[in-house]
Image: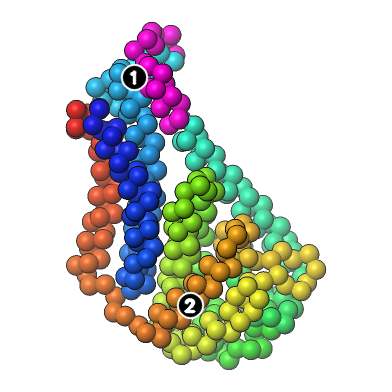
Amino acid sequence: MFWTSYLLAVLAIVLAWPVPVFLSRASWPARSPFTAMLLWQAIALAGGLSMIGAMLVYGLEPIGDNLIAGLRALAGMVLFNAPTTALGFWHIFALSAAALLLAHLVFTLLLTYYRIERQRRRHRELLSLLASPSADGTGTMVISHDSPVAYCLPGGARSVTVLSDGLMAALEPAELRAVLIHENAHLSQRHHLLLWAFAAWRQALPWLPTTRLAQESVNSLIEMLADDVALRTESKATLIKAIAIVASGPSGGMAAMAAPGLPAPHAHLSLTGLEAPSGAVSGSARTTVSRVSRLLSPQPPLPAAARGAVLAGCVLLLALPTALLVVPGLLG
């Protein structure tokens, strides 16, 4: 397993730094945001698997010819007091680091989910006091606020879209439909689950700059995906004007509302349930610029062959570390 651990380490480094940087600077994701979203997920999953796997395989190298044999030997040491003399200091250190990192990632994922649900519940309770149902009765709440505000609050059957009366007064009927379709697309496509995963990844590894790049890129891609749904029924001119009006409000239409006690839906608080990290406002502005530029200067989607190549790359990214870990003696 000597070469396996080093190859996994190299793969983890590549997926943690140059690949995300390159992808965040590429222009093609705006042409096929769904394909790019899949690639970001594959990078995150394969990177985490490679990072943990490299340490695990290195730690088990003295006691097994493959991962399964090494884990069995380790279980014997832990459960049946088998001799541990075969493991040196650095092997024990690597095994401990792998266990701690795995526990840290899982704990952060669960903690992020708990925080999201707690803040969404509080936000929903405040909306029940401070907002009123829309006249169209389509799961839309209206709150009294002069600034243009629009966001959605996931919650299964309790999911709602929240608009300010200032926004409704500023929009034409077609523009309002575009905003509602956009927000409903976030709910129907379960974008909050993606944001939860990438928010947890960033919180678990805040020292890794690429976690910020990944989260910002995913935020932008889900907006483009929702825009594409709105474009099925509304014109580009209508959607561009609606985006501009929503973005004209404080913090891009996501600022604190005047109603006392209602938390500010910072940068998709409604989707993630978490307040925006430092720099989220500027990130929201960049997303708005990207969305408008994409609509003003439309580019054709990636050719089917290119999309197929990216999808094949996603499969390869996930298959390579998995094969290195589970196929006995793949590299010796």
Secondary structure beneath dot 1 equals helix
Which residue was labeled with disc 2?
289
Q: What stretch is highlighted in magenta?
A: 79-99
* Residue 33 in view of the camera: yes
Majority SS type along the magenta span: helix
Q: In this view, does 232 lie to the left or right of 321?
A: right
Asked whether disc 2 touches disc 1, contact meaning CB atoms under 8 Å apart, the reply is no
Which residue is depicted at the point 69% across and 62% down?
124
> Number of numbered discs present?
2
Front residue of 231/53: it is 53
Residue 47: x %, y % from top left: 37, 46
* Vertical side of 90 occupied by 137: above or below: below
Badge 1: residue crowd in 10 Å (few <14, some 14–19, many ≥20): some
Front residue of 135/164: it is 164
Q: Is 92 in the magenta?
A: yes
Which residue was labeled with disc 1?
72
Which residue is depicted at the point 76% across and 74% down?
258
Front residue of 51/80: it is 51
